[in-house]
Amino acid sequence: MLVRDHADGPQVLMGQRGASAAFMPDKFVFPGGAVDPDDAQVPLGTDLSPLCTARLEAEGGMRAATLAAAAIRELWEETGLMLGTPGVWPGPPHPDWAQFAARGMLPAADALTFVFRAITPPGRPRRFDARFFLADATRVQGDPTDFSAACEELSHLQWVPFSTARHLNLPFITEVVLAEAEACLRDGGKPDSVPFFDNAQERSEFRRIA
């Protein structure tokens, strides 16, 4: 979730999935997607905070650095916006990261704050174990309204006021995360704990990662 201050109140960047998409057609969503195997090998220019790292790895699973790299890559691919910091790549980058290297940038994981996790309930046609990050648009390298380098996965990329975003065609979990992000921003952008909708088993469980 990329956010920015505005004269009319905080805004969040959202895009619309295509009508023919197999997953969540026509829905407005945050940029994001699946982790690629190569994300585990990406050199970070700056690291996640120790607290975010501990929270991401508290339940086991993927390394926090891999998840951060995936989030930054997906933001770049779907919006053309780069969360980077100046740095030299230690070797030839994977093609997905070629533009970062060409601009002398490494992914800046310290721009990310882990704010939500959700696992899709059983029985859905597609399931996910999603981690949501919050990042300030001031950390973007370049113009945060320039989406010219974006792929075509999301259309109608736009900065949406939090006050009106809930009136868009949103998936339920996006509505929940949006409300949590707005509350987090009011509290200074650093959550005391991270909500976790755990639907890995038949019985849903909500808890918070301290």
Image: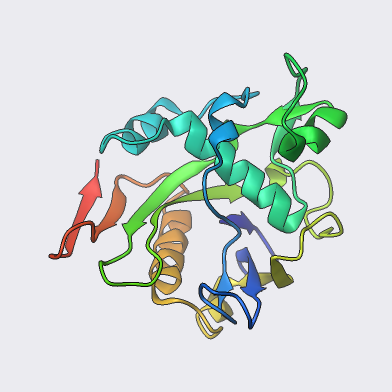
In the image shown, does 51 or 203 lie closer to the viewer? 203
Considering the image in quadrants, where does the N terminus appear? bottom right
Snapshot colouring? rainbow
Q: Residue furthest left?
A: 203
Name the quadrant containing residue 169: bottom right
Residue 174 drawn at (x, y percent): 45, 69
**Where residue 3 appears, x then y in whole percent?**
61, 57
Q: Residue 3, relative to residue 68: is it above or below?
A: below
Note whether residue 45 is visible: yes
At x 73%, y 73%, the residue is 155
Front-most of residues 100 and 92: 92
Q: In this view, does 156 lie above or below 134?
A: below
- Please indicate whether residue 28 sits to the left or right of residue 115 in the image: right
> For the image shown, how many numbered marks are present on the structure?
0
Task: State left or right for residue 81 relative to residue 54.
Answer: right
Q: In this view, does 164 lie above or below 40?
A: below
- Which image quadrant: the C terminus? top left
Tell me where residue 183 sits by quadrant.
bottom left
Point out residue 152 in the picture as x, y percentages from the top left corner. Answer: 76, 65
Q: Is residue 19 above or below residue 5?
A: below
Residue 68 in the image, given as x and y percentages of width and height: 53, 37
Q: In the rendered image, is residue 103 in sight?
A: no
Identity of the residue drawn at 25% across and 38% down:
59
Q: Which residue is at a point 33% across and 30% down the rendered structure image?
A: 54
For residue 209, which quarter of the picture?
Answer: top left
**Along the viewing direction, whichever of 187 and 204 lies nearer the viewer:** 204
